[in-house]
Amino acid sequence: MTSEGSPGAQAAPVDQDVLIVGAGLSGIGMAAHLRLNCPDRSFTLVERRANLGGTWDLFRYPGIRSDSDMHTLGFVFEPWKHEKSIADAPAILEYLNRIVDERGIRQHIRLGRKVVGADWDSAAARWTVTMEDESGARTTTTARWLYLGSGYYDYDEPYQAYFAGREDFAGQIVHPQFWPRDLDYKGKKVVVIGSGATAVTIVPAMAKDAAHVTMLQRTPTWYAVRPAKDGIANFLRKILPEKLAYRITRFKNIRFQDIVFRRARENPGKIADYLTKRIKKALGDRYDPVAFTPPYDPWDQRLCLVPDADFFEAMKADKVSVVTDHIDRFDQTGILLKSGEHLDADIIVTATGLKLAIAGKIPVRIDGAPVDWSEHYYYKACMFSNVPNLSAVFGYLNASWTLRADIVSEYVCRVLNHMRDGGTDVATPVLNDPSSLEEENVFDFSSGYIQRSLHIMPKSTAAMPWRLSQNYMQDRIDMRTGAVEDGILRFGHAAAVSNSTPTELEAAE
């Protein structure tokens, strides 16, 4: 066993073995995996909000639903039982609440606890985490391992595109991330700016009550029409045991996602033709090539789902229209476009995207030195070079978020059990010479929210293990069967670890 430091060095006691930050899919998944795979480890799950659920509790806009099927967005250990595979937020929250109750997790959750600092002490081999409650009062807790399930975007501040004349508009301007509970759009004219997953969800949902909804897009998006119900999954549940039916459906959907993505990269024209034919079939004589022919290839940005063609059905019912143009300015009664056309509006929804955040914007320090994530490399898609006892989840861009969350949780449990069996306190992916690595932008998606945030992202290389891979099938094999002790992940004890884990800056010097 590779071990740094002296086995005689004593790690300081901790309040819990593992502190999980965030009670969304990632955090709840890790808690469940700990119960399954590390029952000897104590843990606490802290959540800044008043409810669990993360994204599915924060966003309250009309129609909010998953943009992945729930047989892959659901956990590997917990079958999805609802008839609809493309699920709405209430159904997803019901699923998460059932898991925390049935698996004894709820008593480990502390709501209303915002993490405002995390400090690693090599001499004590532990994290000291500072939290703030709703009153502003601060407390601290200690843990051997810090697991960040805090998501990938800024909960406090969405991306707000600049629009001239915004202050002149006499109606309401709403961003989906902060949807007013009392927003009344019945019988009103609504303009939704944007054409991504959020916009294509909001538009048909609002169209049920609004006088008319216009989706204003600068650039068209690729859409995939599919049924909200998975007929094969529902059939299998009738004839097979629940867990077996779920396993088969999950495998089917994972393979299908993988095949479509790979074919889109290998032969984008063929996939573009297929998607276009489906849209033409859904719209009939309402099809407009200007509105539905993106200037990029499928899967250069995340493919947007249109369950049961609801968006296109609303267009055919004259409840929804799509305008492709650029905004000149807002005025008192709506939006003036560069073409000279004017869109009248009582309500404008700015579905302009998210603002990414790394590590939940938590200031992280190692022995007093601040961590700049952009100077560290991903290790096996979940840890970071020269950062001890810390893991995080950044889901797949080309598949369901939870696929990564599951394999990361399983891997971290393997590491924790390896530490227990070896009598070590610290695990650090050690990188001594980053100059030898070939960097690669694994975020090769043209989506605005990705491109705007590349400067804050950790680094990734062309080869494992210093990589945030987008290949779930291979990741699953590597994370489950690859050696924990690979010569890079070093295991050690208190006090001596800091002498053997230089930062990239120190290594470069």
Image: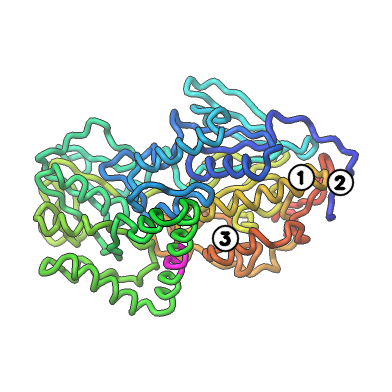
Q: In the shown orientation, is residue 195 left or right of residue 262? A: left
Labelled disc at residue 426: 1
CB-based contact (under 8 Å), mark 2 and mark 1: yes
Mark before the other along the chain sequence, 3 or 2: 2
Residue of label 3: 468
Residue 361 seen anywhere in this rendered image of the structure: no
Image quadrant where one finds the N terminus: bottom right
Q: How far apart in space, not on screen, are marks 3 and 2 (Cα)?
A: 29 Å
Which amino acid type is shown beneath numbered disc 2?
A: Gly
Q: Secondary structure at mark 1?
A: strand
Instruction: Please state the horizontal and vertical placement of residue 381, each as a whole percent of the image.
Output: 59, 57
Range of the magenta residues?
254-258
Labelled disc at residue 315: none
Prevailing SS of the magenta stretch: helix
Q: Residue furthest front?
A: 239
Q: Residues within 10 Å of mark 1 (few under 14, many from 20)?
A: many
What residue is shown at x 75% (from left), y 61% (from top)? 486
Residue of label 2: 5
Above or below, 393 relative to 105:
below
Which amino acid type is shown beneath numbered disc 3?
A: Leu
Q: Residues within 10 Å of mark 2 (few under 14, many from 20)?
A: some
Instruction: Please state the horizontal and vertical placement of residue 360, each as a whole percent of the image.
Output: 52, 42
Residue 283 seen anywhere in this rendered image of the structure: yes
Q: Secondary structure at mark 3?
A: loop
Q: Secondary structure at mark 2?
A: loop
What residue is shown at x 56% (from left), y 67% (from top)? 440
User: In terms of depth relative to the viewer, which is nearer, 108 or 325?
Assistant: 108
